[in-house]
Image (tube, rainbow, N blue to C red):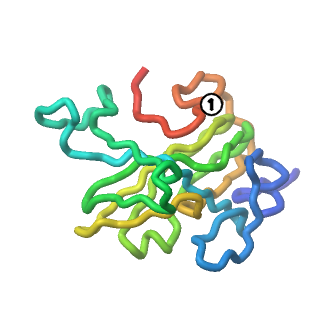
Amino acid sequence: MEQPVPVLCDTQIEQLVEIKPFERAIKRDGTISYGVSSYGYDVRVGTVFKIFTPTPKTGGIAVVDPKAFTDDLMVTVDTEEMGTDHVIIPPNSFALCETIEYFDIPRDILVLCVGKSTYARCGLIVNVTPLEPEWRGKVTLEISNTTPLPAKVYANEGLAQFIFMKGDQVCAQSYADKAGKYQDQGGLTLPRVD
């Protein structure tokens, strides 16, 4: 009986998981690292960010409601359009962004996300819920600035690491089977309840 492989290594990630564009982990001076690593893949953040603002554009008192989240609570910033390489996240606030990479997760693999130490050591925390088996798309990442100071996040550079865990059996129901609401998202997607 073949033993299960709990965590995929670099060669297995490249062979088993569709990642576009796929990047090697090479030293890029002055850049926060990205690409495949020994046992993970460091994703890059794109150029479009939605930054939380406590004052909705429509006026009134803002309440964050996951069942009725509106774009009025966010300000969209495209670093490419602004001609800059970074975005500023206000103190004690957060931003949503998207990965440059597109993922197609196999039916027997679950992906967990952890933040990169470079940002964590600056008080920036990255969160992503697990990518379930057969999930596809660009990933929406959440970045929290836990500090009392504004913080920079660099577009087109590494932000988080994905860890790929292989099950010893194929799941009975995948994300695709249950027609998950975030399937095939093409980029930054706000929360929604279907």
Query: 185 above or below 110?
Result: above
Looking at the image, residue 61 lies above or below residue 43 = above
- Residue at position x 18%, y 41% in the image: 55
Q: Is residue 133 left or right of residue 58?
A: right
Q: Residues within 10 Å of mark 1 (few under 14, many from 20)?
A: some
Q: Which residue is mark 1?
A: 184
Most foreground residue, 110 or 193: 193
> In the picture, which quadrant includes the C terminus?
top left
How many numbered tags mark residues here?
1
Residue 167 picture location, percent across and down? 71, 47
179 above or below 165?
above
Q: Secondary structure at mark 1?
A: loop
Left/right placement of residue 182 relative to residue 169 reads: left
Location of residue 72 in the rendering, given as x and y in whole percent from the top left corner: 28, 33
- Residue 122 percent across, percent down from the top left: 39, 73
Q: Position of residue 78 (x, y in %)?
A: 47, 48
The residue under the point 57% across, 71% down is 32
**Residue 131 against residue 114 in the figure, above or below:** above
Which residue is located at x 56 percent, y 38 percent? 187
Which residue is found at the position 39% from the left and 65% from the top? 124
Amino acid bearing label 1: Asp
Quarter of the image where one finds residue 106: top right
**Which residue lies most toward the right here?**
1
